[in-house]
Amino acid sequence: MPDRTGEFADAFPRKRFFIDMFTRDIALEDCILDLVDNSIDALIRTRDLDLENEVLANKRVAKPATISVVLSPTVISVADDCGGIPLQKAQHEVFNFGHSLKGFKDLTDRGLGAYRIGLKRAIFKIGKAFTVDSSHSNDGFRVRQDLDEWVKRDSKLEDWRFPLEELAPSKLDSPRNGTYIAITDLYDNIKQLARSDVFSDSLTRSISRTYSFFLSRYVRLTLNGVEVEPTPLPVGSAEGHEPAQEVYTDDGVHVRIRAGLAPRGPKGEWQMERAGWYVLCNGRTVVSADKTALTGWGAGILPQFHSSKGRGFVGLALFTSKDPLKLPWTTTKRGLNRESPVYLRARNRMQSVARPVYGYLESLFDTDDTTSDEREAAKSVSLAHARSLFQGAGSRFRPPRTRGTSSTVNVQFKVPRAQIDAVRNHLEQPRMSASEIGAHAFRYFLTNEEIE
């Protein structure tokens, strides 16, 4: 038998397989949000934003950066003036599938990019050709590639590289100190979505919710020329109302948990679709209005979320870390890693923080000794400024303050109908109502027990 010492079995990646598997489980909406994440990451690095404190502060920069998203059947593009990509990072890190240890730290510190796959995944998902122009300081570059041609070259690792052309910023399509990403020759299913007003409206709502802490404060974002306004988190405020709150650090992740009452809607009602838990990682909304076991409902000390009783509940769980990989989000950043130890411990605390709030809401519907003043106080809850709510280390839940204490309460209980008829016969009052009989019995008790 010939000596095979030193021989190897090939275990190279193959481009077509890699692209197919890489893009199979991600939606177009998530791809566009990933591209926006890259712009906001550049802004965080360029302006040295402190996500742990500045995101929650009531602060607005004098000149927000701009992000322009264009959605059409011929091109999907994102342009920004958020700082751009340094030439050296483009040459050695940005287009890699994974990074060196130093490159990973430089590109992820405090940002929204945990896995650094969003740019490549979006490009492969959306179309067959792309251009990336970026200027940073006095440097500039362009990467342009036909992906059908790129896939054909697949015999050695060097074939995985993209051609990069160093250019002066004045010769680029990107804004000064910014980046322009354009994906063209779109796939047919992407063209259909790009033509759809339904998809465009859905994307607008997703951007509005996902970046509510960034929009209008640090960045102005437009979709096809129309500015997207932030959707404020539905956190309520009222006289005397204190949310239940915990603040702590767990394995390099700073956690803020808050549970309280939601603001009333335009008709004075609590809105079911906005009730539940909101989970944010480094200021990006990951979960909205969750009412499932994912956030502790029906698992442990919290009951199943009840639509009529729970619609006044809103909880926030904010996770921030300088190492995004420690945050409990999935690769799409539109879900939570259910096995994350940091999140599992946080979920237990979320249940404890939520329980007194939900108990109060239950009392408004189930307990007859709830006064009309208490119900009126609950109706006074209005929208609060979510960015200045986490002050101090913790607090206990307190419901809205009543304007006065009512001198009466309702007393209600059930008895067999035959016993009510027997009392009517005994009193010789055949038209006496059940409530009148109850009041008579109560007065009789007070008199005979010499309470009054």
Image: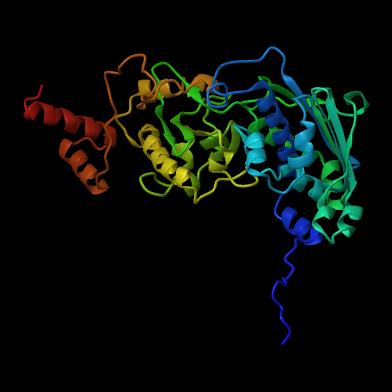
Q: Nearer the viewer, residue 444 or 220?
A: 220
Q: Nearer the viewer, residue 22 or 209?
A: 22
Look at the picture and state if 109 lies above or below 295. Answer: above
Question: Which quarter of the image is occupied by the C terminus?
Answer: top left
Counting from the top left corner in percent of width and height, residue 156 is at 82, 59
From this viewpoint, which residue is outermost toward the top?
62
Residue drawn at (41%, 32%) of the image: 248
Q: Quadrant of residue 42?
A: top right
Q: Quadrant of residue 54?
A: top right
Residue drawn at (6%, 25%) of the image: 450
| 225 left or right of 239 in image | right
Counting from the top left corner in percent of width and height, residue 116 is at 68, 43
Q: How is the image coloured?
A: rainbow
Look at the picture and state if 248 lies above or below 290. Answer: above
Look at the picture and state if 138 lies above or below 75. Answer: above
Residue 93 can be seen, yes or no: yes
